[in-house]
Amino acid sequence: MLKKRIIPKFLIRNGRLVKGVRFHDNFREAGNPVSTAKVYDAYGVDELLFVDIDATPEGRPASGSIIERVSEEVFMPFTVGGGIRSLEAIATLLRSGADKVSITTAAVENPGFVREAASRFGDQCIVVGIDYKRMEDGSTKVVSHCGRKTSELDPVEWALRMQDSHAGEILLCSIDRDGTMSGYDLDLIAKLTDKLEIPIIASSGAGSLRHCHEALDAGASAITISSMFLFSDHSPIKVRSYLSTNGVSVRSQKGSHS
């Protein structure tokens, strides 16, 4: 049985670690991303996820400088997202030390880009981020441009299309739950688990140990956690211990320097 993964999620703005609510509200600074990554490495988390939230609005790819600094300090796998629109940008980030890249807006604008990227760098390097929100009519739509532009795409159908385009994983992010610590979108996680063959990374909503267990029990292969780690007393050690006690197969604690 594949072990479930615990992935701290870092949102980067102006070189600093930040966290907001529903993508745009109540941003708080949360420290230095490099030193924080070293702490999580010591905790023995499975992976890290870095998202440069200014990259897409500013029309540039995610900054490689922070990635280079992190890769010099920690040796666990990590994924980088933000403004990635070209094969050259992916190559630069992989050379800087990233193991995978997350493509969100560019996939919506040019679905063929995902297939091209997977062909060049391998499926295992390509994560497709699916940001979505609930509409007033009750439907759920994929959004792009950091939540500013709504498409007509259904997230389940879009995930299946991205799987067919050779995405290696799907990063599922609910704008409505982002930063609220109110729990993951279990219904959509379960729907995707039933239809997809590739792993699902559940993002948005972690606020308690129970929330983490629920998302993995619904079928997610991994969970990202941001606010709960940054603004509560829950640590990766607590999460791992709780999951293990409740029958979830997780990796034993071991930092990359161990």
Image: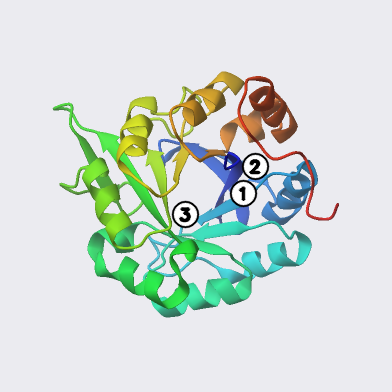
Q: Is residue 180 visible?
A: no
Q: Residue at x 74, y 32 (%)?
A: 237
Q: Earlier in the sequence, mark 2 or mark 1?
A: 1
> Which circle marks residue 17 in the picture?
1
Residue extending farthest front: 1
Label 3 secondary element:
loop
Mark nearer the N terminus (3 vs 2): 2
The residue under label 1 is which amino acid type?
Answer: Leu
> At label 3, which amino acid type do we have?
Ile
Of residue 241 and residue 89, the one placed in the foreground of this image is: 241
199 and 7: which one is in front?
A: 199
Labelled pair 2, 1 in contact (Cβ < 8 Å): yes
Q: Residue at x 18, y 26 (%)?
A: 138
For mark 2, does the 10 Å Cα neighbourhood hold few (<14), some (14 to 19), or many (20 or more) residues?
some
- In this figure, which colouring scheme has been used for the structure? rainbow
Does 245 sit above or below residue 88? above
Mark 3, residue position: 53
Residue at 58% in and 64% down: 99
Give the mark, 1 or 3, whose residue is nearer the N terminus. Answer: 1
Where does the image place residue 149, in percent across and percent down from the top left? 24, 50
Give x and y (percent) for residue 96. 62, 73
C-alpha separation, residue under disc 3 versus residue under disc 2: 14 Å
Q: Which residue is mark 2?
A: 30
CA–CA distance between discs 2 and 1? 5 Å
